[in-house]
């Protein structure tokens, strides 16, 4: 019976991680498309791609700063 419980717990963890990763993936694609489409040069497009990778970190930082944490 202990083996069956372990299988159920691991299945639940996979579902939660998949949902979180999917949300980040959609956010990344949207930010990359926006930043690259508004770029006027190749360098700005590359910079926009890099910003699309790290924008969630800046969002959380600014939110915590706003909330005074």
Image: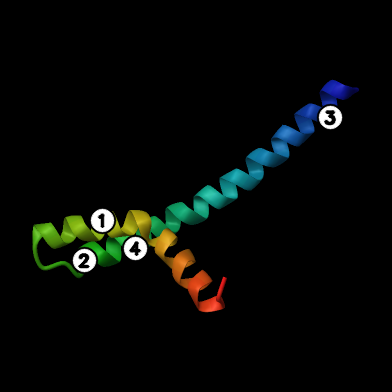
Whether label 4 touches label 1, CB < 8 Å? no
Front label number (2 vs 3): 3
The disc, 2 or 1, on the residue closer to the chain's N-terminal end is 2
The disc, 3 or 4, on the residue closer to the chain's N-terminal end is 3
Q: Residue at x 17, y 59 (%)?
A: 45
* Element at label 3: helix
Residue receiving disc 1: 49
Q: In this view, does 3 lie above or below 50?
A: above
The disc, 4 or 2, on the residue closer to the chain's N-terminal end is 4
Whether label 4 touches label 2, CB < 8 Å? no
Q: Which residue is drawn at 50% across and 78% down?
A: 66
Q: How far apart are marks 3 and 4 (CA)?
A: 40 Å
Q: In this view, does 23 lie to the left or right of 43?
A: right
Q: Distance between the residues labelled 2 and 3?
A: 49 Å
**Mark sitting on residue 39:** none
Which quadrant is home to the C terminus?
Answer: bottom right
* Element at label 4: helix
Q: Residue at x 11, y 58 (%)?
A: 43
Whether label 3 touches label 4, CB < 8 Å? no
Q: In this view, does 29 lie above or below 69?
A: above
Q: In this orientation, which residue lies closer to the viewer: 43 or 4?
A: 43
Q: Distance between the residues labelled 1 and 3?
A: 43 Å
Whether label 1 touches label 3, CB < 8 Å? no
Residue receiving disc 4: 31
Q: Distance between the residues labelled 4 and 1?
A: 8 Å
**Mark sitting on residue 37:** 2
Local crowd size for mark 2, using a 10 Å CA cut-off: few (<14), some (14–19), many (≥20): few
The disc, 2 or 3, on the residue closer to the chain's N-terminal end is 3
Whether label 2 touches label 3, CB < 8 Å? no
Residue receiving disc 3: 5
Residue 36 point in image, percent of width and height: 22, 62
């Amino acid at each position: 019976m202990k083996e069956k419980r372990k299988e159920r717990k691991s299945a639940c963890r996979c579902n939660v991680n998949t949902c979180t990763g999917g949300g980040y993936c959609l956010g990344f694609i949207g930010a990359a498309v926006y930043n690259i489409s508004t770029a006027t040069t190749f360098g700005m497009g590359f910079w926009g791609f890099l910003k699309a990778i790290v924008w969630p970190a800046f969002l959380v930082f600014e939110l915590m700063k706003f909330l005074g944490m």
